[in-house]
Image (cartoon, rainbow, N blue to C red):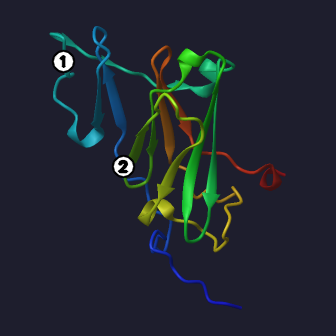
Amino acid sequence: MAEQEFGPLRSRVARKPWPECPNIVIYRCSHCGRLYQGLGYDMPAQEPACCDEPMERLKPLHLEDVSPAINVNYKIVGGFNQSAVQVFWEMKQPEDKPEWVLLKTFAGGYIKYVTSKKRPPMVFPLSDEDAYVYCDRSTCQECIFRCKRGFIIYLYIKTMGLLEVPLEKMSDYFKS
């Protein structure tokens, strides 16, 4: 049996990391639509202001709150040495396309803007602690260990607001 090598993106921690990334809080200006993203560690003493008024704190919606108008799904691809999260979305109305997608992980977050020509999936490559896996498989089986439990996908959709999708899916094979 060939010995597996550690790739440059592979996590080298001995156990699953605890989520250390603070909560993400997003504010929106009701006049101009500007967004302000803050982290739990550096939240301002008072709510941020824009256009001479306090900004509105966005409360995340859950997928069941906006279904069937929008469907969001994800897939963990790769495994031991290289892994990524692919985010897919389907909209009934084209104007409901996300403006950006943010993946909150154990150690931080990744944000990507959805350009006018971008089609799903949005791919977020993982590294260091975020790439932690329990097994040594080359392909993620979405098993009972759910290595990425604690990750959250946020999508901002101008017509709906902020949508939150936790990574808690498990393959049907392991549910029985």
Dot 2 falls on a residue whose secondary structure is loop
One can see residue 104 in this view: yes
Distance of label 2 from label 1 (alpha carbons): 25 Å
In the figure, residue 59 lies in which quadrant?
A: top left
Which numbered mark, 2 or 1, is in the foreground of this view?
1
Residue located 68% across and 64% down the image: 139
| Residue type for callout 2 | Cys
In the figure, residue 29 lies in which quadrant?
A: top left
Residue located 58% across and 35% down the image: 119
Instruction: Specify the label residue 9 is tagged with.
Output: none
Residue wearing tag 2: 21
- Percent of width and height locating residue 167: 58, 45
Residue wearing tag 1: 49
**Left or right of 171 in this view: 18:** left
Residue located 45% across and 27% down the image: 99
Residue located 56% across and 26% down the image: 62
